[in-house]
Amino acid sequence: MTVAACGGDMSDLDRFIAETKTKHHGKVDPLPEFPPYQTFAYSADEYRDPFRPQTDLSQVAVAEQESNGPRPEATRRKEPLEGYPIDSLKMVGLLQQRAQTWGLVKDPDGTIHRVQPGNFAGQNHGKITAVAENRIDIIELVPDGLSGWVNREAQLAMAED
């Protein structure tokens, strides 16, 4: 057995290469002309700088100290449902015993928690205000953007599984 190597007559390949080199001549367009750079002098010095805050931060600090609005309780111990966003919690039932009513809330991990008015839920300092047959009412405490806090209503509706 013998192994044949590539070789032999390559005149057709040489002819193809020569034809290709003569046919295709690339052309590069000249670079476009750019106008020279013009400097710009900003003449609106008397107007407010758009890159600085509109409010005077020293005034905000005074307003923060004087604010008597709602605030989160910093020393309060966190409850288990405060580790989850409100929209990830589901009301799955209601438990009544004599005059006591509890809502049953399922967290994303599948654990069911018993809650009543006064308990907290959600990551925005949500306090449960009422437990009804088909919903749990919550008041959340959210930042207002000016170093204060505002109350916002939320609800957990009965899950339809």
Image (cartoon, rainbow, N blue to C red):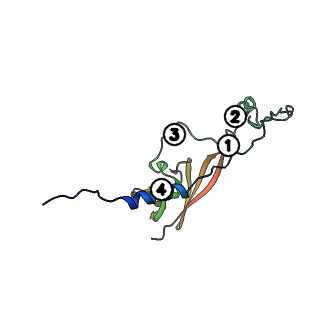
- Tag 3: residue type? Arg
Between circles 1 and 4, the one closer to the viewer is: 4
Label 3: few (<14), some (14–19) or many (≥20) C-alpha neighbours in 10 Å: few
Between circles 2 and 3, the one closer to the viewer is: 2
Q: Residue at x 62, y 56 (%)?
A: 153
Residue 114 seen in render: yes
- Tag 1: residue type? Gly
Label 1: few (<14), some (14–19) or many (≥20) C-alpha neighbours in 10 Å: few
Alpha carbons under labels 2 and 3: distance apart: 21 Å
Q: Tell me which label, 4 or 2, sits earlier in the chain.
A: 4
Alpha carbons under labels 3 and 4: distance apart: 87 Å
Q: Which residue is mark 2?
A: 64
Question: Which labelled disc corresponds to residue 34?
Answer: none
Q: Which residue is mark 1?
A: 145
Question: Which labelled disc corresponds to residue 18?
Answer: 4
Q: Which residue is mark 3?
A: 76
Between circles 1 and 2, the one closer to the viewer is: 1
- Left or right: where does residue 133 sit relative to residue 97? right
Q: Position of residue 74 (x, y in %)?
A: 55, 37
Q: Tell me which label, 3 or 1, sits earlier in the chain.
A: 3
Q: Tell me which label, 3 or 4, sits earlier in the chain.
A: 4
Q: Secondary structure at mark 1?
A: loop
